[in-house]
Image (spheres, rainbow, N blue to C red):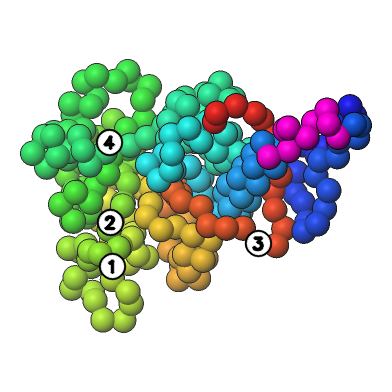
Amino acid sequence: LEVRALHDGDAITPWEVVLEITGPYDHFAHLETLYLGVLARRTRVGTNTRRVVEAAKPREVMFFPARHDHWMVQTGDGYAAHVAGAIGVSTDAQASWWGSEGVGTVPHGLIAAYGGDTVLASRKFLEHMPEEIRLVTLVDFDNDCVRTSVALADALGDRLYGVRIDTSEMLVDASVVPQMGSFRPTGVNPQLVHNVRDALDRAGHPAVRIVVSGGFTVEKIREFEALGVPGQFPLQGGKSPGIDSIVIRQQKPHRESSILSPARSGPG
């Protein structure tokens, strides 16, 4: 058999040949469903991740899909997202094909285990983690991201690397309620990010980074850009960074041009 193929991560257009196998068909017919299925799924994941990565630049994108799909697809999907430009994935399985590890943030479950006390949960987390761990904590457990973010920064100082805003699309954050009237107030919205960034700066914590998650499609990222939500680098006037990272979770079907992703075999 002679096999010719493009490389992982190559950009492709509709109807472009990505894999060519020359030889007796009965030598590889039994593999057809396997390699077509792997190519289709991983190309979908890679393409959608690349589009988010391109829309989010210069912000970093992390791929956290593990809770939204079957566990057996984690390895290949994580590698596809990595090839497409995601800087981190949420499980060790997703990172295994390139020899890395999963990343994450202090979760709602741990905060709940400490009675909803986000500061206490973060302190306990740090007690069991090495100094080099960059602590990022979810700050929407009480639906008051401004108060929780400032409380965390005041309590933890330099040990707090960043805060993650993950407000449900069904809720309005406490800081946004007085500002309602001219925009969609639910979920993670531009005004909420401004509120958190401004509050951290006023409290003397300009170095604390912001991670956002929750329905961040290419369209939502572009909306944030159009509305002038502060970006990764300092703005004019000395303001500190706004959004530093974006977490994506689910993938929608791809259209138009795509990103070729790996044709590895195996259960992942």
Measured along the vertical axis of the image, is residue 63 above or below residue 198? above
Quadrant of image for the N terminus: top right
Amino acid type indicated by mark 1 = Thr
To which residue does mark 3 refer? 255
Range covered by the magenta-colored residues: 25-33
Relative to the observer, which residue lies in front, 20 or 259?
Answer: 20
Labelled pair 1, 4 in contact (Cβ < 8 Å): no
Q: Tag on residue 106?
A: 4
Along the polypeptide, which appears first: circle 4 or circle 3? 4
Residue 50 image offset from top left, x and y in percent: 61, 50
To which residue does mark 1 refer? 186
Q: CA distance from mark 4 to mark 3?
A: 35 Å
Amino acid type indicated by mark 2 = Thr
Q: Secondary structure at mark 3?
A: loop
Labelled pair 1, 2 in contact (Cβ < 8 Å): yes
Amino acid type indicated by mark 4 = Val
Q: CA distance from mark 2 to mark 4?
A: 15 Å
Which residue shows up at 77% across the image and 58% down it? Answer: 14
Q: CA distance from mark 1 to mark 4?
A: 23 Å
Amino acid type indicated by mark 3 = Arg
